[in-house]
Image (cartoon, rainbow, N blue to C red):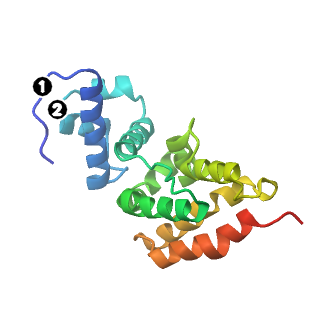
Amino acid sequence: MEPTPARRRRGAALDDALLDATWAELTDRGYELLSPESVAERAGTSKSVVYRRWPTKGDLVRAALLHIAGRDPITAPDTGGLRDDVIALLRQVNTRRVALASALIAQLSDLHRATGTTIDDLRTSLTTGQRSAMEEIVARAVARGEVNPAKLTWRIVRLPEDLFRHELLMTSQAVPDEDIIEIVDTIFLPLATSQPT
């Protein structure tokens, strides 16, 4: 690791440098070996600067994950139809999040052990305060009359992403397109669009 030469930075520029350094430390060394001191050295600042912003290592890593995910946010496609929207969403996640997810799987078991959190806790913290892309897609489909709201549950709405995430966690690779189509066509759409009984 080559430390960044010290220079005067403030506000967002300093935060960005610290969070970039945190992500680099996490991917290079893992959660266990990451420290506020190593982050400060890599960012070319002092450890007190890190501690003032993020009092614990867990806080620092969660902030870095939000920072990295926020650079290329997942958006809800609007193709005009539920099927195409969900397929486009899963394909988008495939291209934008596989590397991030693989790094998380490989590096964050120590974070979960140290903080008593789970992958789902982390996912929730990354999406807190905003409607997920899947929820937005389904809400538009309800407004268009494509989805039967009487049959919807939060589990059905999350089902495509949950099945996609399971495949990703099991293989640490991009989910094949045929699997995305199968998730949407044979599992999700029959549940979301069925008529009330």
Is residue 115 positioned above or below 183 on the image? above
* Secondary-structure class at tag 2: loop
Query: In the drawing, what numbered circle is on residue 35?
Result: none
* Secondary-structure class at tag 1: loop
76 left or right of 135?
Answer: left
**Mark 2–mark 1 distance (CA, rounded to whole Å):** 7 Å
Query: In the drawing, what numbered circle is on residue 7?
Result: 1
What residue lies at 42% left-to-right and 33% top-to-bottom?
Answer: 56
Residue 132: percent from left, percent from top: 56, 47
What residue lies at 79% left-to-right and 59% top-to-bottom?
Answer: 151
66 left or right of 192?
Answer: left
Which residue position is annotated with label 2?
Answer: 44
The first of marks 2 and 1 along the sequence is 1
The one of 48 and 185 positioned closer to us in this rendering = 185
Crowdedness near tag 2: few (<14), some (14–19) or many (≥20) residues, C-alpha within 10 Å:
many
Residue 9 visible in the picture:
yes
Residue 107: percent from left, percent from top: 38, 57
The amino acid type of the residue labelled 1 equals: Arg
Residue 27: percent from left, percent from top: 30, 54
Residue 197: percent from left, percent from top: 90, 66
